[in-house]
Amino acid sequence: MSEKDIDLLSSKTENKFLLANAASGRAKQIVEGSLPYVNNFDPHNPVITALREIAADKIKIKILSAPKIDPNKLLKRKTEEEAPSALDRLSKDAKKKKEKK
């Protein structure tokens, strides 16, 4: 690939990391049997084919954001008042076992 192509590719994404991840993901799809979206593909190098697809705008790179979490729906830890201590649980269980005998 020439410097012109690399400059074109770098303008398609925000950074090189996103470009590398998108190209590797598409290259994996091509290796697994997906047909290339460009006519001038390289049958022996799926990474070059993936980069050519991105340069030809056949592949769009989107950044997905994480879903917003409602803080009210988060699990709340039990406070010390709500949850008995381990010693209390053990002593209550011990008392119950003695009462059953």
Image (cartoon, rainbow, N blue to C red):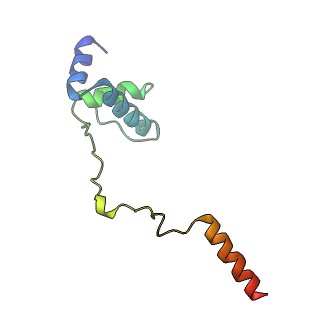
- The residue shown at (37%, 36%) is 26
Can you tell which quarter of the image residue 100 is in?
A: bottom right
Q: Image check: 2 left or right of 25?
A: left
Extreme-right residue of the structure: 101
Which residue is depicted at the point 27% across and 45% down? 65
The structure residue drawn at horizontal position 26% and vertical position 36%, both measured from the top left corner, is: 61
User: In x, y percent, where is residue 70?
Assistant: 28, 59
Residue 50: give x, y in percent of width and height: 34, 30
Q: Point out residue 89 in the picture as x, y percentages from the top left corner.
A: 62, 71
Determine whether, in the image, residue 76 is placed left or right of residue 71: right
Image coordinates of residue 78 in percent, x first then y, are 45, 65
Image quadrant holding the N terminus, namely top left
Front-most of residues 31 and 89: 89
* Position of 100 relative to 42 (above/below): below
Q: Quadrant of the C terminus?
A: bottom right
- Where residue 38 sits, quadrant-wise, is top left
Q: Residue furthest top?
A: 3
Instruction: Name the image quarter holding residue 97.
Output: bottom right
Q: Is residue 33 left or right of residue 50?
A: right
Q: How many marks?
A: 0
Residue furthest bottom as drawn:
100
